[in-house]
Image (tube, rainbow, N blue to C red):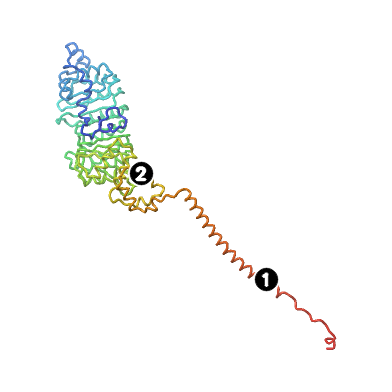
Amino acid sequence: MFAYYSHGYGSSFGDSDPYSDGYISSDDMYKNIGSSEEEEEEGEESFDEAETEALNKEFGGGFDRKTYTSSYRVSSGSGTNGLSRLRGILSNAIDVKNWAIYGNPFTTKEAWKRVGTKLAANTNLLRLSIHLDGENPLSAEYLEELTSGLAGNTSIIELRFEGIDDNMAPLSDDWMQTLSNFLASNKSLRMFHFANLGIGNDQFSILSAGLSQSAIDELYVTGGKLGGETGMGIDRRLLSALNESLGRLSLLNLKFLSLSANKLGNDAVPAICTFLSQCETLKGIDISKNTMTNDSCPLLASAIRGKSLDSINLRWAKISSFGFAHFLPLIFDGTSINSTVESSHTLEIVSDFNHSSPMNTALNINCDRTLSIAKKIRKKVSYLHFRGQFSLLQVLDLNVILMPRVLEFVVTECGLSSVYRLVRCGNVSELFGFPSADRLRVRELEEENDNITKENEAIKQECGKLKEEIEILTRELHRTRKSCQPVAKRPRTESNDVD
């Protein structure tokens, strides 16, 4: 039903794909809100005179039944006048989960106060949608009464304010401040829509102050003028205000943000990128229907690199294939096998552009929810690294013990032609020479024997040197002993005595 939750992040609101051909947008869904319940109603709903009087009394005499029924019938597209839905709201019916108010059928301050009181007492309503028109605007005073009562409700998790025609006068700062105050104090809302009401940056600044204190995790601010009146650029002051507002929103635990159809151009992209870098919980962003061009793509691609973002919607922007090429390395990095593995395998880049083959292949893999992350990686690696005359360098550098898995992968994902290239062009003796355990043991023993032999040779050489030194020392010892012996005396004889 909704762009973010339809991706399966934990909502029970719906499971349709927002980018499929059969997708029903939240705008269209609201036109048929609760249609399954209303289809069961037979014929035209009506109140008798007594019931009409009781209903008018219920709202202090400020209920315009004609405006309520005609606006509901025309705007909802359901073919009914919404009276049974109103009965369900008043009786807190368990099967009434959605309520939409079109135009301004409650004509007094007291009537809106009682609407708020009834909503405060309702424990079954999940979604409230208020559609404003230019002929019967909801004043700030009336909004104050509604939100005062609505503050007591804890069942509503989704609130929507939407303009239903092009004649809407700009909402006042007081009106925005009242809404902002309510959002700041409410801790049960999880989804908030503010659509087609021409919001500008000054009003967005007021609104973001309240939003930053809420518990909302899915936010739609669409159909405004955040990029200026014409979409051709905004001045420095308003750009600073936009940056400040998005900075506040980054404090929320937002999982999805839509700024669609806000006339945002390239000058607003740095503020969006700053938000993307600061909001750690974000899973999806919709900036479709804006005026950004190819020049914005390098910044956006850099901002979402390494983030846990699952979708970025750039549909109906002024971006060509040249711009989208900057996003390809995020999901299909073919620099190396490791780079491919580290690419994002969940990111969806939504556009109305007919992408080239690599981008189209990558997006199809990422969008296939039947594939696990491991299977997506296998498909990408096979496409980028094992097709055609692929390089063998990365494979040859692998440890030989991994080759059985490499072969299994190539056979399964790439086909026999790739296997043939591996066998034919690779170093077969090194690549596929897997020795047995006995052969490995023999090699170990041979290496050990070689080492021992080398050690023995070294020892023999050392022994030879020691023997030479011993012989030298022995000769030196003999010479020393000989030089130290005393001279022998001649014996005395008679001849010596005569002399």
Relative depth, front residue between 234 and 429: 429
Q: How crowded is mark 1: few (under 14 residues within 10 Å), some or many (20 or more)?
A: few
- Residue 421 is situated, as x and y percent measured from the top left of the image, at 31, 50
Amino acid found under the numbered disc labelled 2 = Glu
- Residue 57 is situated, as x and y percent measured from the top left of the image, at 21, 14
Q: Earlier in the sequence, mark 1 or mark 2?
A: 2
* Foreground label between 1 and 2: 2
Of the numbered discs in the image, which one, if any, rests on residue 477? 1
Q: In this view, does 252 lie above or below 34?
A: below
Q: Is mark 1 on a helix, strand or loop?
A: helix
- Residue 460 is situated, as x and y percent measured from the top left of the image, at 57, 63
Q: In this view, does 213 lie above or below 419?
A: above
Q: What element carries label 2?
A: helix
- Residue 353 is situated, as x and y percent measured from the top left of the image, at 20, 41
How far, Cα to Cα, is label 1 from label 2?
Answer: 77 Å
Q: Quadrant of residue 68?
A: top left
Relative depth, front residue between 465 and 152: 465
- Look at the image and tell me whether residue 245 can be seen: no
Of the numbered discs in the image, which one, if any, rests on residue 413? none
Q: How many marks?
A: 2
Q: State which quarter of the image contains the N terminus.
A: top left
At horizontal 85% and vertical 88% (from top left) the residue drawn is: 498
Relative depth, front residue between 234 and 311: 311
Relative depth, front residue between 463 and 418: 418
- Look at the image and tell me whether residue 449 can be seen: yes
Residue with the most extreme bottom position? 499
Q: Residues within 10 Å of mark 2 (few under 14, many from 20)?
A: few
Amino acid found under the numbered disc labelled 1 = Leu
Q: Name the residue under label 2.
A: 408
